[in-house]
Amino acid sequence: MPTPTEERTNEAWMEALRASGPAQAAALDELRQRLQRNLFFYLSQERSDLRGLAEIELQEMAQDLAQDATLRILDNLDAFRGESRFTTWANKIAIRLAISDLRRSRYKDFSLDQLSADGDFALQSSSAQLVSSAPPNPETAAERENALTILERALQEALTEKQYQALTAVTLNGVPMDVVADQMGTNRNALYKLIHDARKKLRQYLEAQGLSIDYLLSLFQ
């Protein structure tokens, strides 16, 4: 076992983590503590959205995330290719886990039911994201209003309920795919296929109405 001032090599990390008994326990504890320190730095110094939290709250978040990341790393040791230091690889996994966890917590109160009733939610969101900050002239404003009406009708008429929910949530409202997939009881691959099919149907509907995607993009620039 390395001394406190001695750094484990990649080979030493892999050997210890794949061992059993005290050797593995010591390596896991060292890894968890390393990740916790790095995660606390990330949460406290690099996440401006968390600056309102007390230090004890950030410490607790870092501790929980480090525990989860340690277990994930242990389950994915075969994915390590030795192209970097093991600790660098492990820290990237921990940070990605933190980003995913924080993103999911942001949408913890999101519900697909918001997108299902009468379309108002989707129309407001699509308008906000499509319309530029510069005020249009009256002619352009009228074109935009007509295009948005057709777009909303297309969302309602051309798509199935699931396609409508998925496309509106992910594309127009920016909800992470894993959050939407969880709520729909599916996985990312299936959700990606659902959105791909929805976009294809939407494009066909709009083109049948005389609206091209290029025209819409130029209209709202």
Image: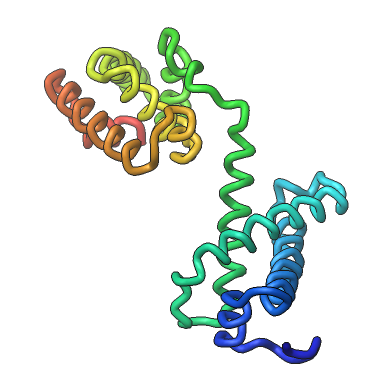
Q: Which residue appears at 26% of the width and 20% of the height?
A: 159
| Picture quadrant of residue 162 | top left
Q: Is residue 6 left or right of residue 181?
A: right
| Picture quadrant of residue 170 | top left
List x then y, in percent, for residue 117. 44, 9
Q: Which residue appears at 42% of the width and 25% of the height?
A: 126
Q: Quadrant of the C terminus?
A: top left
Q: Is residue 169 visible?
A: yes
Residue 169 versus residue 83 in the image, above or below: above
Q: Quadrant of the N terminus?
A: bottom right
Q: Which residue appears at 39% of the width and 23% of the height?
A: 165
Q: Is residue 118 left or right of residue 73?
A: left
Q: Is residue 33 left or right of residue 185?
A: right
List x then y, in percent, for residue 148. 33, 19
Residue 176 versus residue 54 in the image, above or below: above
List x then y, in percent, for residue 56. 87, 51
Task: Looking at this view, name the residue that lies furthest to the top.
Answer: 118
Q: Which residue appears at 69% of the width and 74% of the height?
A: 21
